[in-house]
Amino acid sequence: MSRTEAHITDELQAATSAGNLDKITKLLNEWDTLTKGVPFSPIEDLLPLAARNGDTRTISYLLQRRKPASFKDAILTAFDTPNVDTAVFQAFLDGGFNINTNLGHIGDLLILSLGYPDVLKWALAHGADPNRNRTGMRSPLDLAVMRASPEAVLLLLRHGARLNNTNALKAAAFYGELGMIKLLLEAGALINEIPDCEGMLSSEREDGLGTALHEAANGGQKEAAELLLERGADPAIKNSLRKTALDIAKEKGNAAVVEVLESIMA
């Protein structure tokens, strides 16, 4: 029976799963001869298999042969392994991967690495931009705060992540993350700022853009409201819909926050 692209593809996947580089080389040469330079290449399908195995040698070889149209599947597979290895991402980078490439609705490598401190350190050290414009998406700092990850927040700030005109402090207030609020204020967050950045919090879509105190009121976070007031939050500030934090707390039925704010306003 004559050899077909399907035969070669199946054998390539088996050879890549086994890490048999000699066999991979032979099969790719056979593929190129059979297809006579047709643009499609199985390499894009093979990279995730090599990434799953942490096989940097095969990754490097495949990328020397041909750079794929997209690294998305390979990057996602590298994260979806028991032991996420920065050496795999280094092999991608050495093979032509742009570390700030948009990978679609999931964001980019920096966003994906927020739950993996070693990868996050590596990414920031290798040019991942914590302030890159991610249209319609939250900043890495916002996401690190929302995931309650102080280590990620500190790493991002040390590598130049913008703190103000983000939703970071407001997110910490909405979720009642007292330690995170303290961390951000100590890092220089502006307590009475009303950010006009992209990616408003879902709580603001109907209730208007406001301060961190507005968000504590919105989330019913009494202790967060008390902490913000202690640190200088102004309860008289009105949001974009001309509402104070007290107005928001009353509308949401957050009685404990209402009590705190009324005592301060009195």
Image (spheres, rainbow, N blue to C red):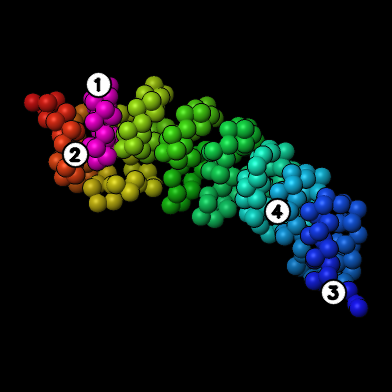
Tell me how far mark 3 sits from mark 2, CA to CA.
68 Å
* Residue in the image at 29% along x and 47% along y: 203
Single out the residue that lies furthest toward the bottom.
1
Q: Name the disc covering residue 230, or none.
A: 1
Residue at mark 3:
4
Q: Amino acid at mark 2?
A: Asn
Q: Residue 219: x and y, percent?
A: 27, 40
* Residue in the image at 58% along x and 36% along y: 116
Could you tell me if the residues under marks 1 and 4 are in contact, i.e. CB atoms within 8 Å? no
Tell me how far mark 4 sits from mark 3, CA to CA.
23 Å
Side of 141 where 77 appears, left or right: right
Question: Which residue range is magenta in the image?
Answer: 212-233
Residue at mark 4:
48
Residue 68 lies in the magenta stretch:
no
Residue 219 lies in the magenta stretch:
yes
- In the displayed structure, would residue 39 be above or below residue 237? below
- In the displayed structure, would residue 25 be above or below residue 141? below
**Which element is circle 1 on?**
helix
